[in-house]
Image: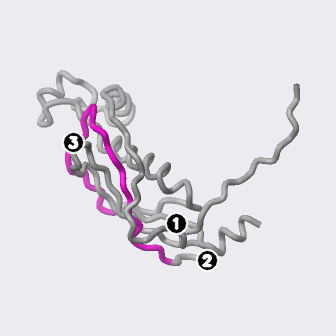
Amino acid sequence: MTRPHVEPIAPVLLPAEDMPIGQEIDCGFHQVTEDEIVRFASTWDPQYFHVDRDLAAHSDFGGLIASGLHTASIFQRLAATGVYQRYDVVAGKEIHGMRFLRPVRAGDVLTCSITVQSVEPQAAGRCLVTIFGGLRNQHGRSVLELHADSLVRSRDASARMAQ
């Protein structure tokens, strides 16, 4: 059986100017598991307090904790699916002042939020978007905070690409 040829349809992505400045956006949540902590760290950050439960029990943390890079990756995943995938993002540009405020442990439920702080014209067809974002655990305590800049297509560039 053959299928008729169907042209893929590009998603309709919103321009930078449609981003809600000053509004806190809930980007969803993720529950961290011990297996996930160990798998990520075994590949990307194999320090004993991320990969070995017995040794981690004698660390300053008193048990396994997620790598900071793992925590940042959870933020990125939630931010991308919660906000970025709706907008015509060109690329990330810079992360300012990423802070790991407390350990993330197996069983923690991390909730992500982003506030768009500014949308400024940059080069032709692009805007510089600055966000403040973070993750909170199930107790409402911040575990990660950051400011980040991204390039997002402007209304004029997005309209031209849709034609």
Task: Please report whichever mark, 2 or 1, sits nearer to the chain's N-terminal start.
Answer: 2
Instruction: Give the labeled residue for mark 1.
Output: 151
User: Could you tell me which secondary element the residue under label 1 belongs to?
Assistant: strand
Q: How far is mark 3 from mark 1, CA to CA?
A: 31 Å
Colour mapping: one colour
Residue at image location 41% in from the left, 62% down from the top: 94
Image quadrant where one finds the N terminus: top right
Q: Callout 2 environment at 10 Å: few (<14), some (14 to 19), or many (20+)? A: few
Q: Nearer the viewer, residue 145 or 109?
A: 109
Image quadrant where one finds the C terminus: bottom right
- Residue 89 position in % (x across, y down): 56, 61
Which label is found at residue 103? 3
Task: Give left or right: position of 160 versus 116.
Answer: right
User: Could you tell me which secondary element the residue under label 2 belongs to?
Assistant: loop
Which amino acid, by three-letter code, is at mark 1?
Answer: Leu
Task: Give left or right: position of 65 versus 129.
Answer: left
Magenta-colored stretch includes residue 114: yes
Task: Give left or right: position of 151 versus 47.
Answer: right
Task: Please report whichever mark, 3 or 1, sits nearer to the chain's N-terminal start.
Answer: 3
Q: How far is mark 2 from mark 1, CA to CA?
A: 11 Å
